Amino acid sequence: MPDVVILGAGMAGMACARTLLQRGLRPLLVAPEPDVASRGETLSFRASPYLERLGWLDLLDAETATPCQGRYSLWGSAALRRDASHQDEQPGWHIDRRRLEARMADTLDTAGIARRRTEARQLSQEPSEVTIALADGGSIDAAYVIDCTGRAAVTAGPDTPLRRLDRLVGCYCVLTLDDDVDAVAATLVEAVADGWWYMTVMPGGRSLLCYFTDSDLLPPGLRKDPGLLGPLLSQTQAIAARLDSLGLDPTASGALIFAPASTATQVRLIEHRIIRAGDAASALDPLGANGLATALWSGIQAAESVIGLLAGNDSQAKDYERRFLEGIASFLTTQRAMYASERRFSDASFWQRRSHAAPARA
Ligand SMILES: Cc1cc2nc3c(=O)[nH]c(=O)nc-3n(C[C@H](O)[C@H](O)[C@H](O)COP(=O)(O)OP(=O)(O)OC[C@H]3O[C@@H](n4cnc5c(N)ncnc54)[C@H](O)[C@@H]3O)c2cc1C
């Protein structure tokens, strides 16, 4: 019986596996083959100490990451401005998440990680073990399970649901820049009546364009026809101008990709022999660009918690749970303030829903 089984091999699961391997444990990593679409995300500079600790800072190279040159937004007024909150900070990186995660996975394989390429279906907890039923028909017993299954949150139950606070969805495409285009590596964010846009560069001469709105506000037919982006883009100023200056036409791109992006919170991270990390512990609105750094931090902390629990000491686990839930409460307060600072569309459902958001609760 393995001491520790990690479910999910996103950034949280891999940070967790790497930490346990570094500390001499032999965890089993259970996850299906990766199916992450190539997506550009912003990796906050806050991730630096975690990447360094994991020995992964060197993985940020020209193929996986482009240093970010700040964030500009058209939010709260019609003037484009450089975000004050990003001015004093080191700006972080624009990453190709699929490539970066593949590199992280290689380091785990080189270190001899044990893998089972399937999904967990159901868990049952006994006093001295957890039994995991697998999609391949098998089952595994483990002393501890770390749930890093992202928004799937396979260990969430009736008493511990991943509580969704909104219906935000991201609809995105990856666009290829012409060879002679030298795009400034900055993020651009623009609010519109039904949501907001996010545009960034990606390593390899590409750009990511993403429209965030609530699932019920998506124009019918958009899932099949990227041409329907046209009327949505005509409501933007900075995004339309940037696309134009880079010679990009997302309406002529291939199929759009849709990803759930709602804020979803958990009430408990430690439940007997189950520990949660990353989006499985609480998923954040991408507006704050904090999900990846949180996944890395919480993966490390969940691993350290289990090491303590195996030695009969639950203080690290309790401390991890407290700090995570306090962090989420603080994030929700910041998120509400960010949405509240946009008042130009106060009649629109998207913004009304956010102005009436429930008070932050961990
Ligand atoms: C459109 C969009 C844009 C975003 N932009 C940013 C950004 O710019 N910056 C930022 O910091 N964050 C961003 N985020 C958030 C960020 O992507 C997540 O917070 C982060 O990926 C969470 O990592 P994770 O490891 O917890 O989960 P995931 O990356 O979702 O990984 C979950 C893993 O679990 C596996 N799995 C699922 N179910 C099972 C199961 N039953 N059994 C076993 N394995 C399972 C999956 O295959 C996968 O390997 C964005 C999110 C979205 C949706």
Image (cartoon, helix red, strand yellow):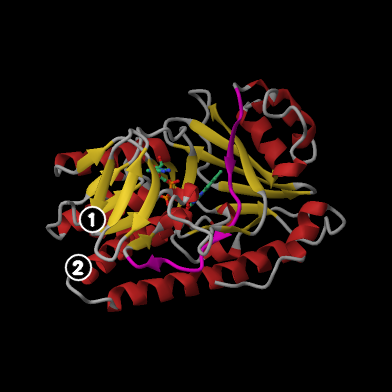
Q: Quadrant of residue 362?
A: bottom right
Tell me residue 126's x, y (percent): 30, 61
- Pick the residue in front: 144 or 307: 144
- Are circles 2 and 1 on residues that touch, CB within 8 Å? yes
Element assignment for label 1: strand
Q: Which residue is mark 1?
A: 4
The answer to if 297 sits in the magenta stretch is no
How packed is label 2: few (under 14 Cα within 10 Å), some, or many (20 or more)?
Answer: some
Disc number at residue 310? 2
Question: Does the Cβ of the disc 1 residue fall within 8 Å of ligand 1?
Answer: no
Please tell me in which quadrant of the rendered image residue 224 appears: top right
Residue 112 percent across, percent down from the top left: 14, 42
Element under disc 2: helix
Q: Specify whether residue 263 is painted magenta.
A: yes
Image: 81 above or below 62: below
Q: Name the disc covering residue 177, or none.
A: none
Q: Residue furthest front?
A: 126
Residue type, label 2: Leu
Tell me if mark 1 has few (under 14), some (14-19) or many (20+) residues whose alpha carbon lies within 10 angstroms of its own: many
In-front residue for pair 82/281: 281
Q: Residue at x 24, y 60 (%)?
A: 53
Instruction: Give coordinates of residue 23: x percent, y percent.
Output: 15, 60
- The mark nearer the N terminus, 2 or 1, is 1
Seen in the picture, residue 251 relative to 4 is either above or below; the reply is above
Three-letter amino acid code of the residue under disc 1: Val
User: Is the C-beta of the residue carrying label 2 under 8 Å from the nearest atom of ligand 1?
Assistant: no
The magenta segment is 255-272
